[in-house]
Amino acid sequence: MMKTRPIYFFLFGLFFVQTSSLNASQISNQEYINLYKDIAMQEMKSHKIPASITLAQGLLESGSGNSRLAVQGNNHFGIKCKKNWTGLTIIEDDDEKGECFRAYSSAFDSYEDHSQFLKSNPRYEFLFDLHILDYKGWAEGLRKAGYATNQKYPQLLIGLIERLQLAQYDTIVFYGKKDEDYFKQPLFKANIQIVDNGVPLTVARPGQTVHSIAKENNMRDWQIYKYNDLPKDARIDPGMVIYLKPKRNKASIPSHTVEPGESMWEISQKYGIKLKKLYKKNRMEPGTEVKPGEVINMRRKRKEMPDTGSIIIPQKEEIIDIKPTNPNNKIEVVTPPQQTEQPVSNSNNSIKDNALYYTVNVGETLYGIAKKLNVSIDSLITWNNIINNTISVGQNLKYYIQTPSTLTPPQKNFISHTVSAGETLYSISRIYGVTVDEIIQWNNLEGNDIKVGRLLKIEDRR
């Protein structure tokens, strides 16, 4: 929180000063606004704090998101720990040396805590009696309540609001946007823990597509595909991290330990590094994956390729066993013996003929793959021992060509779910471990809209 630190430094640093400390990784005022305007408007809708005030404070307190508190601690409002804080912390010099500031797992959490901080503190109570569009009254009131000791604090906030036209976001919330669906769905946190690399991004909301995200951010569809290493038929799921500018050639940290089920594409999105650069730094062929527990380089090129284990090549049905420890660095190719087609036993619903393999591409889901292969989702889950519908890019899924004479449809058990206030198809899907598309299919829904009190049919997979 801004107290007696030099306010003018931030103002001039934001708009006028070009020094050697400003580098290509820093984001601009407009990039900051594009990143966080939706969150600020949602906070205004939920907590009655002007979005213009929230954005102006975020810009000023975090140096447009470039300060150490913002980059390393996701603290965009300079809020200190105080006695009642039990969360993450970060140490920074302010009024005194080595003061304790709050730290967050995401910028979203920082914005939410800022709202709760103002709402729960009695000294800010009078601000909520002001008109929601009176950003000047709010700016002056924050100084009076002690948020900042600098007498110029109101003028600094008002200057930012008027210079960057932040009041437009207040009117969008207050008078309502033409697109009534804009605030219908809640904001979603990123589905991965992002490690900041200075690349502007957004988090997909329910129902969004590549085209809608591009249009909302004044971009072309091809830019979304290219900047995020996505195939042309990629599907956008809620919570998906979408970069709005090209990812970097290097990450902000030197290395990463691969977690179970984590793909190279997910790692590239997590750290904001180009996928082809990530492969090149680790001497890997594009499309291959690394075994869990392997440490891969994120900044410098490694000397040897990491352990990628066995790779199934669907076209030739060969298993290539790559053994980096082989002194001759040879690749041993093991071709499975040819099997004659076996009759199918309907008594136990099993299939014993030769399997085919499908490699999961970026952005694909079980639902889309099942539809493409003309098989059921349940069959894919059973054949590949899939848990919680989770698949990863590069994973090879076993499947069989099915005909009505060779398969007996599996029996499904369904349960009913009554929609409660605030629930969405996405939140309901998370409860039962199914997909939004499956709920839509089971209930013959035309879209993602559901009414409170509606009974939904859900397959019981528990």
Image (spheres, rainbow, N blue to C red):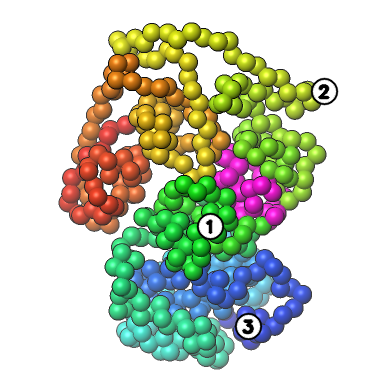
Pinpoint residue 368: horizontal percent, then vertical percent: 40, 39
Which residue carries the number 2 mark? 328
Q: Earlier in the sequence, mark 1 or mark 3?
A: 3
State the separation of the CA atoms marked 1 and 2: 43 Å
Q: Is residue 267 magenta?
A: yes
Q: Nearer the viewer, residue 256 or 372?
A: 372
Q: Residues within 10 Å of mark 2 (few under 14, many from 20)?
A: few
Number of the front mark, 1 or 3:
1
Pinpoint residue 16: horizontal percent, then vertical percent: 66, 85
Q: Quadrant of residue 67?
A: bottom right
Q: Nearer the viewer, residue 159 or 412?
A: 412
Pinpoint residue 319: horizontal percent, then vertical percent: 62, 21
Q: Residue at x 63, y 83 (%)?
A: 15
State the separation of the CA atoms marked 2 and 3: 59 Å
Pinpoint residue 215: horizontal percent, then vertical percent: 45, 65
Q: Which residues are magenta?
A: 249-278
Which residue carries the number 1 mark? 222
Number of the front mark, 2 or 3:
2
Number of the front mark, 1 or 2:
1
Q: Quadrant of residue 97?
A: bottom right
> Which numbered dot is residue 15?
3
